[in-house]
Image: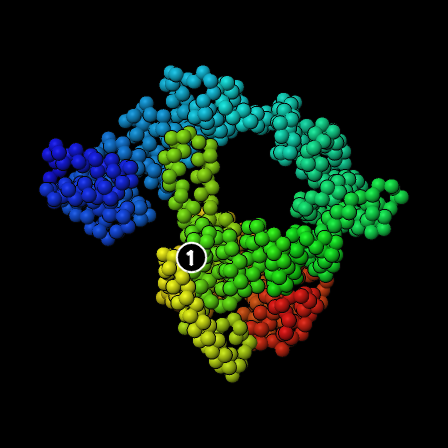
Amino acid sequence: MRELPQKEANLFKQILKCYENKEYKKGFKGAEQILKRFPEHGETLALKGLFYSHLDKKEEAYEFVKKGLRYDLKSAVCWHVFGLVYRSDKNYEEALKCYSQAVKIDKENLQIMRDYSLLQIHTRNYEAFADTRHQLLELRPQNRQFWIGLAIAYQMMGKPDLSTEVLAAYEGTLKDIPSKPDYEHSEMLLYHNSLIEETGDYQAALDHLGTIEAHVCDMKSIREKRAQYLLALGRQEQAEAAYRVLLAQNPDNFAYFDGLRKSVGLGSETLSAEEQVKTLEMFKQLQQEYPRSNAAKRLPLRYATGEAFERIADEYLRNMLRKGVPSLFVNIKTLYADKAKEQTVEKLAMGYLAALDKSKSFDNSGSSTVEPPTALLWTLYFLAQHFDFRRNSDQALAYINRAIEHTPTLVELYMTKGRILKHAGDFVGAMNAVNEARELDLQDRFINSKCTKYMLRADNMAEAEKTVVMFARADLADPLNDLVEMQGTWFSLECGESHERQNQLGRALKRFHQVEKHFNDFTEDQFDFHMYCLRKMTLRAYISLLKLEDQLRSHPYYVRAAQNAVRCYVALFDRPDGGDSEEMEGMTEAEKKKFRSKQRKAELKAQKEAEEKKVLAAQEITKKGGKIDQDPEGLKYSKTEDPLGEALKLLKPLQELATERIETHLMGFEIYIRKNKLLLALKALLKSHKIDANSATLHEQLVRFALAVQKAGDSLKPTVKSVIDNHWNTLYQSYGKDLSGFTAAFLEKNKEEGSVPHLVSAAIAVSLIDPVNNKAKAEDILFLMADSDKYESTRSLENCLLAKKMLKSLRSSRLQEFTAKAAKWFPKATALQS
């Protein structure tokens, strides 16, 4: 039965309005009224299920929607509702099937087709999206959104020429063009212009700018685009004039200076002596024209060299130190890519300090100019950051301590001291220093968050949790959970890494999955904008959003969380049921037994304390009406039956959206080699090799892969063996199966470059090739970093700890010797103290 009597039909229309207005309880009551008289009315049953879905009763929702479909299988409304329920559960594949069925039944229902198109673009099915948008346009050619939607579809398919044709056709239908600039019309015209630019026809784009200028609100975009097009067309004089107009409006925009430089024929990154003189002369004129522009003073440092650089840097540094600009070092540290410039900056700053100590001036020339007392403070602050950047912790600490003696109330000094100690490996000292900074300004949320991060780095979880909730609302039942709800990704990430260091893999995985959830939410949040942006005509911003979402999972936070989680899952696979942990590497069986006994006692004590805390916390949360965490230990993750399968779920988004990152494929190899999927492992190696053939981790993985293939031997299927053989030379060059020769060549090449990570990789490789006979050889390779100064630049604390871990796994008798050497390089590192 589909037709309802007049009274019930009117009530059914009211129910639909209730759904549109989000009055779900009222709509639910209306549906029940109809169903009392007509219990087999399929569309009402389906709507009742939809209301159940929005009232968080999912099982009842599916039950009633399916029941409605049974009674009315050919109803477009029932299929549409079924799609909406699936969509609310993020089951987009099934939702699309339901929408497709609904469209087949009712081909002219605009609401169904609109919802169908929204889901198509959300899942990036651009061809189907274009088809649906074309059908909508045919049904309602007077609707502006349908024209724009079709243009967007063609653009996302990589066909901007078709997009421009669609917009040109739409603009041709307009009769009432606003006489004054109208925002929505203006945005559509600028979007049209960006499409012409995307086709590569800059002359047409420039001509189009001239025709739309009178109707555009955003004149800044017009001027910027005109300058870009003139430059792209090689019309240098006109481009120069255009960029000078832009600089007059914003003389601190680096892009404008860059455009001006290119327009006067000085666009090369490597300038000749003559070009350098011209460039510096141009900036000198600009500094006179815009005396308050920081960019005009900073940019010459990028292009000057030798004596010219020293002269300009001297003037720039003096001005900044005199003014007391805390961000001075951050502003110029990019120049340190050039070692000569780094040495010049150091020489100048050391000269200032000596002169200030002697004559309270920046030089010893007998000048009567006396600098303000703060000049000494900011010079010390700058030098502390400079030597910290060079990882000379002793000198950096000496300067920052002197700065603190000079002005013991400046927050930035304590934060910098904390950073220096962190780089030196003293995480507890770093935490205490940043906590001092926090106590100097208890109203600063940034410093509070920074202090929390340092506490987590020191694995002081209890203090970190107390500190971070200081800025939470007093009425919150569970402030820590509120931080997760606010998508505090940094907090989840740092907590997870702290738990991982403490071998609490369940808790760590729980935190890393919180980061994954945040990114899922970011992806889902775009859904509402598919309709909103077309309605409000924020088209350029919308295209930027789509492109951002397409590479969102390549964000460093997600990559870091995924890497950590994969490592945890791999550890769970390698050590099921609490097998030997990393701390046990290198121990004898008796030592392992003693260690396990001690560990069990510590775990029981910690478990008892945790239970007591859990009960108290639960009581407090219940009082305030909050939700109790039923799995604080993350057992859902640590007790999974398929850790590698869970790891793959985290990796797949990276394989789709972050294929250019080598970490994606290195992680993939770790999973596939353990699943004995040799072809997938080979595919991961080939992609890693294409990105960075000299990667340290890749070499170790290549050796492991070759050994896995050797071990498989004749059990390999002929087709699998054939594929591996075809790609063998790509990965192993002319060395074939000679892994010793392959590793020797790898080591020799990277000896010259002085790379410690490559030494560690080579040591791991030789120990894998022949664990019995190559132990001494692996030790000798690791000790190369101690015997040669060429490794000093890459001999970081992290790399030293990797080498120490390697020696421990070898049960090396030289472990203590190496630790003593490393402790001399990093005397404050707590991880190297016995």
**With 21 as the anchor, is 191 left or right in this view?**
right
183 up-or-down from 506: above or below: above
Residue 180 screen position, x and y as percent: 46, 18
Residue 211 visible, this angle: yes
Quadrant hosting residue 679: bottom left
Mark 1 neighbour class, 10 Å CA radius: few under 14, some 14 to 19, many 20 or more: many
- Residue 743 visible in the displayed image: no
Residue 571 percent across, percent down from the top left = 46, 67
For this view, does 675 lie left or right of residue 259? left
| Secondary structure state at the residue bearing disc 1 | loop
* Residue named by callout 1: 478
- The residue shown at (83%, 45%) is 361
> From the viewer's perspective, is residue 522 above or below residue 577?
above
Residue at image position (49%, 64%) is 499
**Is 459 situated left or right of 45 in this image?**
right
Three-letter amino acid code at the position of disc 1: Asp
Residue situated in front as seen by the camera: 232 or 122: 122
442 or 652, which is in the foreground? Answer: 442
Say which quadrant the N terminus sits in: top left
Q: Quadrant of residue 151?
A: top left
Seen in the image, is 200 located left or right of residue 172?
right
Q: Quadrant of the C terminus?
A: bottom right
The answer to which quarter of the image holds residue 677 is bottom left
Residue at the image point whose x is 53% and y is 62% from the top:
463
Return the x and y of residue 569 as percentages of the image width and height: 44, 63
Task: Work out whether residue 63 or residue 100 is closer to the camera in this orientation and state it.
Answer: 63
